[in-house]
Amino acid sequence: MYIYNVTVNIEEDVHLNWLQWMKETHIPDVMSTKLFKGSKIFQVMVDEQQGITYSIQYTVKDLETLRLYQEVYAPKLQKEHTEKFKDKFVAFRTILREEHEH
């Protein structure tokens, strides 16, 4: 099992609009690809010098499925995000592999 983690620091003045858009539009669009098993949004609890940081985590069964998402769907969805919140965020992506669960 893998988690596709997207960490976003969003400026405070648009943060509530961004969060609503993520919950109502972007994440449902990602999930509509049927490639992910689930998703969660976490607020990263650190003192920020600016903005508010979130971790959006999508569970995926294997790397091949994630690569399919990244090649076919991600460019359009990331472009929509960038156009809507241009110059108001920074983001980076990581892939986590599950090693053990109790």
Image: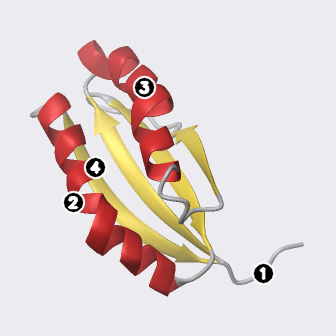
Neighbour class for label 4 at 10 Å: few (<14), some, many (≥20)? some
Neighbour class for label 1 at 10 Å: few (<14), some, many (≥20)? few
Identified by mark 4, the residue type is: Leu
Q: Residue at 43%, 44% (x, y): give it.
A: 29
For the residues carrying marks 1 and 3, which lies nearer the camera in this image?
3
Residue 68, percent from left and from top: 39, 77
Compared across the picture, whether 92 is left or right of 16 comes to left
Q: Residue at 21%, 59% (x, y): give it.
A: 75
Residue 45, percent from left and from top: 53, 36
For the residues carrying marks 1 and 4, which lies nearer the camera in this image?
4
Identified by mark 2, the residue type is: Pro
Tell me how far mark 2 sits from mark 3, CA to CA.
20 Å
Q: Is residue 14 above or below residue 90?
A: above
**Could you tell which of marks 1 and 4 lies nearer the N-terminus?**
4
Q: Which residue is mark 3?
A: 19
Q: Is residue 16 above or below residue 92?
A: above
Identified by mark 1, the residue type is: His
- Camera-side residue of 48 and 24: 24
Disc ID at residue 75? 2
Residue 39, percent from left and from top: 60, 50
Give the quadrant of the C terminus.
Answer: bottom right
**Could you tell which of marks 2 and 1 lies nearer the N-terminus?**
2
Pointer 2 and pointer 1: residues touching (CB < 8 Å)? no
Q: Provide the secondary structure element on which disc 4 rests.
A: helix
Q: Is residue 97 above or below residue 40?
A: below
Residue 15, percent from left and from top: 34, 21
Tell me how far mark 1 sits from mark 4, CA to CA.
31 Å
Q: Which residue is mark 1?
A: 100
- Camera-side residue of 6 and 60: 60
Neighbour class for label 2 at 10 Å: few (<14), some, many (≥20)? few
